[in-house]
Image (cartoon, rainbow, N blue to C red):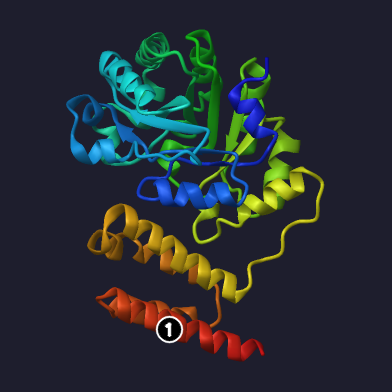
Amino acid sequence: MMNIIQKAGKEGAFLAPLAGISNLPFRLIARSLGCSMAYTEMISANGLVRKTSRTHEYLKTAPDDRPLGVQIFGADPGIMAEAARIAENGGADLIDINMGCPVKKVIKTGAGAILMKKPDLAAQIVQSVKGAVKIPVTVKIRSGWSPSSINAVEIAGIAEDCGADAVTVHGRTADQGYSGRADWTIITAVKKSVKIPVVGNGDIRKPGDALRMLAETGCDAVMVGRGALGNPWIFKGISQKMSGREENRMPTLGERLEMIENHWKMEEQLFGEKISLRTFHKHILWYTKGLENSHKFRELAGSLKNRESILFALKAYFQTLNEGVS
């Protein structure tokens, strides 16, 4: 039977678990444009088990937010198992175990990409989580810890042996962070070495990249991360290309402005005006990146302190862009 990863992989691209980005509003926007699977931001297993209010906020979902992967991170097999049960009860369609995050504050807790250097512990975590829930369990890894320790094939094999239903491979090493280029040959090697579905991740910047990754690596699905920042329309382009239709055109200036306003409104409804004013600023920068004279608007937006003044400046900026086009 085709599992949830394979089914979604045939319908479109996945939205990666991006810290500070993959919240409910952004997931719903991505889904409305063709994203076939979305993941929460990575969630602390300790936070879920201790029932900290901020951590449980990450589990907020909606009927249209399906299928939903909840990604958890931690270093204690028992706590990871309990966190997985909590996420399942909270509406998750699958549990994703983070073994790829290179951020220092995660690494120093023994979680994230450091687990690629601890195969025995990695195995215990997958076994514990798999045994704790009825829904599928997947694992997200990197190509390795460093260029001298490329072990994605080994870790993927361990995950498969311990019951994982799929594995996602980001073709960069942990010490590479998000710099340089992703090595897709690692994704190919993992796909050839395991029988479970493999999701490819890394350097999907435009719809054509997704089809190229599928063709070159043989992976079952592609995951888009930073390529979706300011460009959720990438999911529509990918789904259209996958179905053999002409790639979707770039959004008009009016559509881009409407998206910014709607996205901000969704964030306000969920988090309130004060918090969204602070957290949405980065999205404004991403949505306007690459537009004519965007650097001037971005500098201005950074100096403004309230919603009304930012929206006024935003609309004025887009008006000048429209006048330049006409």
**What residue is disc 1 on?**
296
- Note whether 248 is above or below 119 in the view shown: below
Q: On the rendered structure, is 265 left or right of 213?
A: left
Q: Position of residue 204 (x, y in %)?
A: 61, 48
The residue under label 1 is which amino acid type? Lys
Give the quadrant of the C terminus. Answer: bottom right
Can the viewer see residue 299? no
Can the viewer see residue 230? yes
The quadrant where residue 126 appears: top left
Q: Position of residue 215 (x, y in %)?
A: 76, 37
Residue at (58, 70) in percent of width and height: 255
Residue at (47, 25) in percent of width and height: 94
- Note whether 69 is above or below 162 in the view shown: below
Within 10 Å of disc 1 (Cα), the crowding (few <14, some 14-19, many 20+) is: few
Q: On the rendered structure, is 176 left or right of 104?
A: right
Secondary element type, mark 1 = helix
Q: Position of residue 69 (x, y in %)?
A: 46, 31
Q: On the rendered structure, is 282 left or right of 214?
A: left
For this orientation, the residue located farthest to the front is 63
